[in-house]
Image (cartoon, helix red, strand yellow):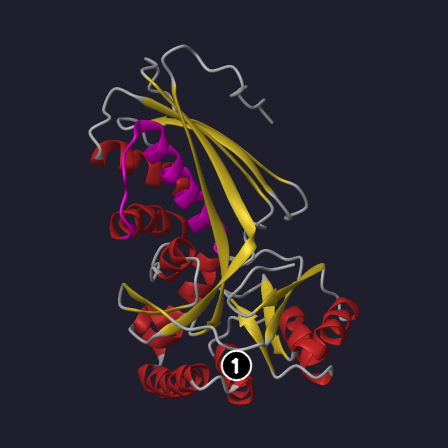
Amino acid sequence: MRAFMDLTEPVPGTLIGAGTACGKAILIGEHTVVYGLPAIAIPLASLHIKATAHISTATTSRLTISTRHADGGRVDGFFTCRSDALSAGSDGAVVAVVAALRKWGLHHEAAAVRLTGDLPPARGLGASAACATAAVRAVADAVGTTVGRRALYELVQVGEQQAHGRASGIDAAAVIAAQPIRFQDGAARVLPARSDAVTVLADTGMPSVTRRAVAAVQSIVHRNPARARGLLDEADCLIDDALAALDASDVVTLGARMNGFHSLLMEFGVSTEALNRLVDAASRAGALGAKLTGGGLGGCVLALTQPHDAAVVQQALMSAGARRTWTIPFGGPSS
């Protein structure tokens, strides 16, 4: 592992900026959102990424990347890039920053970006989108550019397409909004969060491979269009009911629709034995609803609970094999 560049001693003339972004969890609608259906995402406010960017007129056009993940629990990474240097294997944050440099006419400047945070990568929690968002915000801060929400979304989404292939855009929209959103066809609408319910997030300890999960769903859609149409119609009904329940602060119905959506994701082939075990454990412990969240094939389970049941559900998830858990007030900061 190559050493990180020391960003504490900037070269004279270097512009310095900072940016942050939080993670997200999909309450309902992952995968089907790719096919035009709505989805609901909530923020994970205390699972976040911080970025520091140094912008200079360094002459090198060489791209270097060095990223470390400690037990899947943290992001600790560094990269440098220029607008005229981008390799095929560059990750989403690098691609987003290069796109920003080009958009803002910074053709002779180099960006050196340090990313740190406690948002676990490869868990379906939006870490790649959060890294890209924080990095672009840091570059914008360094060069004194105001980047609007839509422009930021478009830059981050370029990176998401690189990271995940066919990315719907929900991760980019959710981490930028940092509020509960309804997302469909590239448009996000902020939703009210009037419930006292909490969510308990549980990590299987196994990475979620979004690109492979997307391909698995796509395979079903192409091989068996009639079955896929039936599953998508079922998903549409579940999501509509969930949106209505959320608007009415009806957490019992919302939880039931989450349960139904997990069963649908099992039909799509993106759940695993470990995910199903955690979902079952949460349900037996009194959760109103539980499902995988994000791409699946690993990653995390999201359980909806009443506040007085959260500790019991959290303990049940740990006993069922969760690597770590977080308790998250609905639509608010996590703990």
Location of residue 60 with respect to 256 vertically, above or below: above
* Residue 162 highlighted magenta (yes or no): no
Does residue 134 appear to the left or right of 101 in the view shown?
A: right
Could you tell me what secondary structure mostly forms the magenta stretch?
helix
For image coordinates 75% across by 72% down, the residue present is 311
Residue 274 is left or right of residue 35, and the answer is: right
Q: Is residue 91 visible?
A: no
Residue 90 drawn at (x, y percent) = 40, 37
Q: Residue at (51%, 40%) from the top-left corner?
A: 50
The x and y percentages for residue 10 are 46, 15
Residue stretch rendered in magenta on the structure: 126-149
Q: Residue furthest top?
A: 12
Q: Is residue 191 left or right of residue 152?
A: right
Amino acid type for the residue under numbered disc 1: Met
Q: Is residue 139 magenta?
A: yes
Question: Which is nearer the eye, 316 or 204?
Answer: 316
**Residue 37's x, y, as percent?**
32, 76
Q: Quadrant of residue 292?
A: bottom right
Tally of marks: 1
Q: To which quarter of the image does residue 315 belong?
A: bottom right
Q: Which residue is mark 1?
A: 258
The C terminus sits in image quarter: bottom right
Q: Residue at x 28, y 37 (%)?
A: 100
Q: Is residue 282 above or below residue 190?
A: below
Residue depicted at 64% across the width and 77% down the height:
279
Task: Determine whether the residue tagged by mark 1 lies in a helix, strand or loop.
Answer: helix
**Quadrant position of the N terminus in the picture:** top right
Q: Considering only vertical position in the picture, is 91 above or below 123?
A: above
Asked if residue 276 shows in the view, the reply is: yes
Residue 277 percent coordinates (x, y): 69, 75
* Nearest the eye: 227 or 331: 331
For label 1, count other residues whose C-alpha is less than 10 Å away and answer few (under 14), some (14-19) or many (20+).
many
